[in-house]
Each structure stands twice: as C-alpha cells, then as structure tokens.
Amino acid sequence: MASDAPETSARDRHQLRTLIYAITVLLVVLGMVLATVIAARPLNAYPFLFFPLGFYLLAQGLVVLIVAATFWFARAQERIDIERGESEEY
Amino acid sequence: MSASTRLRTPNPHLGAYFGIVTSAFLSLVILLAMFEQLGFGRAGLTYALMLLPLAFYVAIAVGARSNDVEDFFVCGRRVPAVYNGFVLAATAVGGIGFFSYTGALFFLGFDALAIGLGLTFGMLVATVLFAPYLHKAGAYTLASFLGQRFRSRPLRMAASALQLPVTGLLLAAEIKIAAMVAAMFLPVTYPIGALLVAILIAGIVIAGGMRTVTWTGSAEFLIGAAGLAVPLIIVSVLVTHIPAPQVTYGERMTALQRSEVTMGALPSAPGRAVQPLPGDAAQASTKPFAQPFGALSKPDFIVLFLCVALGTAALPSLLVRSGVTRSAIEQRKSSAWGLLFVALFVMTAPALAAFAKALIFDALAQVSALRLPRWIGELAAMGILDARDLNSDGAVRATETLVARDGVALSLPVATGLPYVGTVLVGAAGMALALAAAASHLFTAAGSLSEDLYRLIDRRVTALPRIIAAWAAVAATAVLALCTVWTADPDPLHAALDAFAFAAATFFPVLLLGIWWRRTSSLGALAAMGTGFAVVAVDVVVGGLFGLDESGLATLIAGLIGVVAGLGAGIAISLFGPQASAAEEAYFEDMRDPDGETIYDRAQQRAAAAAAIEAARVPPP
C-alpha cells in the first residue's frame, strides 16, 4: 500500500492526520459528556449562575463546548486539506 | 449541459433577500400587535399571521422552481454554507423539537436534556465523519452513494427501501405537528389540516426539489427562530429584567422548586410513577424540574443520548444535504453552521420549558382553587392545561394538573399575559419549522425512491424522465404519509425516537465502515445495514405485537445494539467474505481526497463526452 512516491506519502500522511483529528475531537467531547452525566449529582451541589452546575453543563456548557470543538475542527481540517492540495501539485 | 461549465456562484443578494424576509415578518407581528390593541378581532389577526407566511413560502417555491436535474437534486451545488446550515438546523429541530422536545423538558426537566445534547453531538459526528466525504462522492441520495461506493445495485435498492421507515416516521410526525397547529389556529379540522399540509409540502418539493426545499427552508428557519426568540426574550425581560432567557431561567428554578413542593411534586425514582418518555396525551407533571435522573436512570440517560446522537449523525434527511455546497471544505463549514443553530435552539428550549413551568406552577401553588387566574381558563379552552381541584381540598395539586406535552410552547405567551398575537407567533414559528422539516423528509424519501428504486427496476430509461419519476414519487410518498397520519395517529416524540433508532442501526455502521475503512466489501456493507435494521425491526414488531415496550426505551436500546451488531457483521463479512475490488478501493481513495470536482459530476461529464464522440462517429441517417 505505502510506496515511496511523494504523492502517496502525502496522501497517507493526510489520511492519518485526518483520522487522528477525528478521533481526538469525538473522544474528547464524548468523554466530557459521559463524565458529566456520571458526575451530575455531585456537580449539582455547586451553583453556577443560579443553576446547579451539573444541570448547567448538560443544558449549556457542553453544548457550547461542542460548538467550539466543531469550529476548531473545521478550521484544523481545512488547513491540512489545503496542505495536501498544495503538496499534490508537483 | 456539462456540470463543470455551470457557474457555482451564489446569488449575491441572498443576504438582502433574507434580511427583508425576517424584517418583514417581524414588522407584520408588530403591526398585528398594534391592531390587536386597537380592538381588531382575534380571527382576522390569527389568519393574517398564519396565512401570510404560508403564502410567502409558496411564493418563494414558485420563484425558485426548476426542473433541471442538478437543481432538483443538489440545488446546483452552490448554496452558501450559512444557508445550508439554516436548513440543516430546521430539519434537525423541526416541529418535533419545537413542540415535543420542549414538552418533554417540561415533564422530565433534567432528564430530557439527553435529547438536545444528543442532537448537538450527532451533528458533530456527521460533520467530522460523514458530510465532507459524501460531498466529494457527490451522489444525489444516500442510497446512491452506497450503490456507487460499493458498485452494487442490490445494496442501493436495499438502502433506498430501508431509509423509508426513518424518513417516513419523521415525515408523518412533522405533518401531524403542522396539522395540529393548523387545527388550533385556522378554521379547519385536524384531518383536513393534515391534508392541506401534505398538499403544501408536496407542492413545494415538486416545484423544484432540493432548490425549493433549500430556499423555502431558509425562510422558514428564520421565521421559526424569530418566533421562538421574540416571545422568550420578552418573557425573560418581564420576569428577570435581562433579555437573555438562556442564562436567566436559573434564577426562576429555585422558586419553581418551592412551588413544586407546595403542589406535591416530590422527587421520584426511575421506573416508578413517572413515565420515562411522556406520551402526547394530557398528563400530570410530577417530577421536579431540576432533579437529576428521576424518570430516566443514569444508563437510560446515556442510551437516549447515544441513540439520538448516532441517529442524527446518520439521518438521511440531513446527509442528503451534503452535496449542495461548492466544495468539501465548504460542506464542513456549513455543517458547523447547522450545528451552531441547533445548539442555539438546544440551549433555548430548557429556558422555554422552565419559564412555562414556573409560571404555571407558581400561579397554581399560590392561589386557592376557587380563584385561578384567567389565563388558566384560556389554556384550558385551547386544550393545553386542565387544572381542577379534583379532591376538593381547596388547592390544585401537581397530580390534578394535566398538561398536553405538545402545547407547552404555546402555553408560555398565554401564561405571561402577552397579547394574543404572541401566541399565534409561537404557533406560526412551530408551523414554519414543521413545514421545513417535513419538506426535507419528503424530498429525501421520494428522491431516493425514484432515483434508487424506480430507475433501477424500470430499465427503460425513456419511460419516465428522471424529474417526472421524482414528481410521482413525491406525490406517492405524501399520500402514504398522509394515510399514516390519518390512520395510525403517531405520537411525534416517540415516532421521532423510533426513527432515530432505525437511522442509527441501519445507516451508522455502513457509513462508518464505507467512509473510513478501505477494505469494506459490498457484501459486508449489505450485512452491516441488514443486521442493524433487523435488530430494530424485530424489537419494534415484537414490542408492538406484545405491548412490551410502552415507554419506547427498548427501541433505543435495540438501536444501539443494532449499531454494534451491524459494525460486527460488516467487519466480519468484509474480512472473511469476498474482498473489496480494486475499483472500490480507487473510489475510496478518490472520495477521501478533498480536492476537485465531485466523483459523480466527473462521471457524468465523461459519459456526456463519450456520448458526444459516439454521436459524431455515427452520423444520423
């Protein structure tokens, strides 16, 4: 599969980085959601903006985190996509 | 004719057009509110606020009509990212989110947050894993993509048939929501309302397919968002003096807790008195709003979250919109925009439910049963609230307060004492979102039926041209959905959750394997799809026949089992069955390359060029 041709190595590097980005962003978000659900009761003991913290995180905090993660991901992936496009022009 | 010569620049005046749409709608609302103060009759105001937007959607559909194949299926691949985000959000939220999710929040409070969070996370999963690659493939429907990726006609036909339960359930649910709003505000009965709604969305889809669905959907999204935001901001200012409902309802939650205790709504435990997922009949809300895991246990909460997330990620109605932007990078951005708009709704919905519940419960807890405020009677007349002192102890208890789940959003403006126009505004907003989502689901279902089933079964290419076949499929699907609404009368929330379970089990494994694993074979893809679907289908049939699954939770669990079983079956068959062909691997590599024209469009151009050469070589007699 892997060959020494610069095109193939650029392709493989791009695919590997894409995979790492995808797994990272999904696992981080999923991990935080599950951790918050599991720890919701103890977190609720702390108030935040008059909300119990566990409720606040599930209703808004994590949603904001997902939005931020999505826009970060879109930008990061765009950068490596353009990089690959440039390396293939030779 | 060839796709590469088409101009892929969007209309530069779009921003101005939709700015005008939004401001015209808001001006209409203000104007009608002034007329109401001047003493105009309610009927005229209601018809104006409900019917003028509907007429406007029809006008957009007529203006954007098209019978060009590329316009009909992918809107010419030139929708700007933000506008595609509008329609993605309107489809994901829909009337079900607007009325049923807010209602579920009213009854379950904390426990229903799993649905909103799942919806948001599902959009992220689709953005990261699927949407850009589906754009590069460029197929017009999800089933066409699977057929082209695996060079398999049976797979394509099977996928087209298996997406019907998903889109069909959602379509029926959205038609029901829109018909309920129509029956409440317009002089039509519920069955006639459903008929009119079906005719309207079928007309919109037939006029120009994806093109009209996109532009009417964008307008409907803006009107839906305005109709949700305006009353809620006013309520927030009235109650807390700060115009940001998302952050201010925390203050009201302490007072709400006190009222709940007064009315006897005490903390509950899962599996006891409180139904885990409220049905659409009027019922008592006895679970405290802020109590965590009172109706759904912690594992149930996670199951609900994951099933909604994976179902949203693999929802054909959202993924079919992956081809409408210019490039894979643009597509990723548009999915991110869609997610942002969904996130705004998801953060706002609990505020709506909390304000509505606080207003209703505070009023009932503080006064005796003999002197209930006048708006309680108004809500009763609308069929939303039934609060009576059944045991004659002088107070209305939580168990004596029956609330209709899908009416909670409409109860907020009434309970706040807003002018009647405020109530109609919420109705018009919910109607707009329900129509946008229904048109998307209808287009997805019918487009796939005509492209992937009819055109493969009927090989005589000329018998019915592509667009006319799609028109026929739209009409047939609309009639089918209408009959479902009339006869089965589905509960929108439960129908939507069933659809998510079907979508997750049927399409998530096959898409994950097909897009991310080079060695997936066509037999493996078929096995993944069939296994996942079979697991949920068995659960629904067995649960339906024996009445085992009253709560709807078992279908969600079956959905997740279906995902795992589908992945297992797909991997096993791909590893030990016949290997993927070189052509399939080449398609895989091409799909993963973010640059260049879509694979489908290039194939079309090659075919057109070959046909031109052929025509030149054989001169006509």
Image (cartoon, coloured by chain):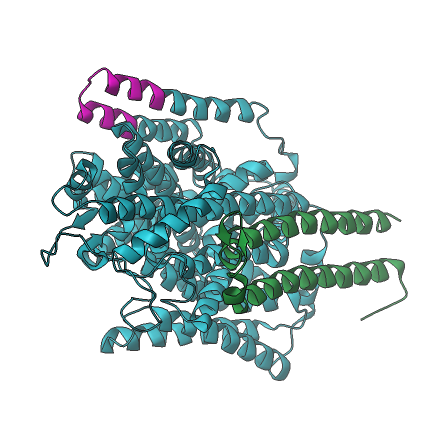
Chain colours: A green, B cyan
User: Within the image, what quadrant is residue B32 found in?
Assistant: top left
User: Within the image, what quadrant is residue B225 found in?
Assistant: top left
Q: Can residue B406 be seen in this view?
A: yes
The magenta span reads B28-51
Q: Name the quarter where the C terminus of chain B is drawn.
A: top right
Picture coordinates of residue A19, whole percent (x, y): 72, 63
Q: Is residue B307 magenta?
A: no
Q: Which residue is drawn at 35% across and 77% down?
A: B538
**From the viewer's perspective, is B200 left or right of B63?**
left
B147 or B613, which is in the foreground?
A: B147
Residue that protrudes farthest toward the left in the picture: B392
Q: Name the quarter where the N terminus of chain B is drawn.
A: top right
Picture coordinates of residue B125, whole percent (x, y): 58, 58
Q: Residue at x 34, y 55 (%)?
A: B104
B57 or B258, which is in the foreground?
A: B258
Q: Can residue B151 be seen in this view?
A: no
Q: Residue at x 42, y 43 (%)?
A: B467
